Amino acid sequence: MNKKPRKEARPARAPGRPKTGTDQASAYNNILMTASRLFMEYGYEAVSLQQIASLCQVTKASIYYHFSSKPELFTIAITRMMAMGMQQTTLRLEEPGTLYERLVNVAAAKMQQSHVDTETMMREAETYLNADQFAQIRDAEHRIFEVLATHFQREMDNGYLREANPLLLAQAFTSLLMLANREDVRRMHDTIAELAEELVGLFLNGAVKHP
């Protein structure tokens, strides 16, 4: 009686190691996107690696295959999200229209999802981040301010805006949009677009009635 040839045993994958190829890249991106959303919504301390793993339907070991630690994942996720935000802000500010119209588009896009204040998140995470990680996030944030500041300076040069520190204006504008995190503020308007229009109007014109 002929025996069937015995199948060779496959070498076991290291614990937590994802499949190779597109599955590996997909898992990496999924972890980053999920982590970005959770960190921005709840802050650093409230989010655990196990929570991220569960939502991504991977093991916690899979996260450690791609990222050495929670601080590293946080740094990469937040800097990547900020880089995307900078690109989107740049595109909207380069569109045709008045500064008011372009800022409304920027504001509406930013306020679609409520998220924790960046300063609050960074104060919370600073204890866990090393100096290089902290600097990477601050640099990514600063690049967004620089994009806004460039356009504010352009409008100053054109005579539309009065002379002021363009970086300070960029930070003031970004801080004003954080009002959309308040549910009572969001309920004041039927749509985010309407809220964006009023906030940008306050930013550009103030609350003083002009003669």
Image (spheres, helix red, strand yellow):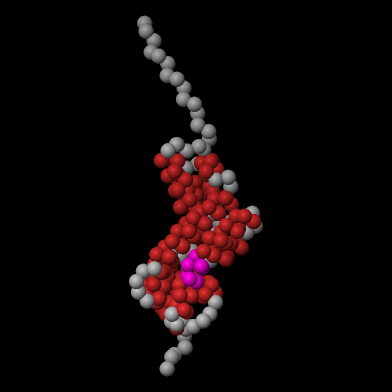
Q: Residue at x 45, y 36 (%)?
A: 20
Q: In this rendering, is residue 73 above or below 196?
A: above
Q: Is residue 164 above or below residue 54?
A: below
Task: Name the residue furthest bottom.
Answer: 211
Visible residue check, residue 25 = yes
Q: Is residue 4 magenta?
A: no
Q: Splitting the image into 4 quarters, where does residue 197 fall?
A: bottom left
Indicate the quadrant containing the C terminus: top left, top right, bottom left or bottom right: bottom left
Who's the residue at 44% across and 48% down the image? 30
Q: Is residue 142 above or below residue 202?
A: above
Q: Which residues are magenta?
A: 144-150
Q: Position of residue 171 (x, y in %)?
A: 53, 72
Main secondary structure type of the part rendered in magenta: helix
Please provide percent x and percent y for residue 41. Answer: 49, 60
Tell how many labels: 0
Asked if the magenta segment contains residue 145, the reply would be yes
* Residue 199 left/right relative to 49: left
Q: Quadrant of the N terminus?
A: top left
Quarter of the rendering containing residue 198? bottom left
Q: In this rendering, would 84 be left or right of 73?
A: left
Q: Residue at x 47, y 45 (%)?
A: 28
Front-most of residues 134 and 38: 134
The extreme top residue here reads: 1
The answer to which of 118 and 138 lies nearer the viewer is: 138
On the image, the x and y values in percent for residue 119 come to: 57, 66
Residue at image point 53% right, 52% down: 76
The percent position of residue 199, horizontal first and vertical second, equals 44, 77
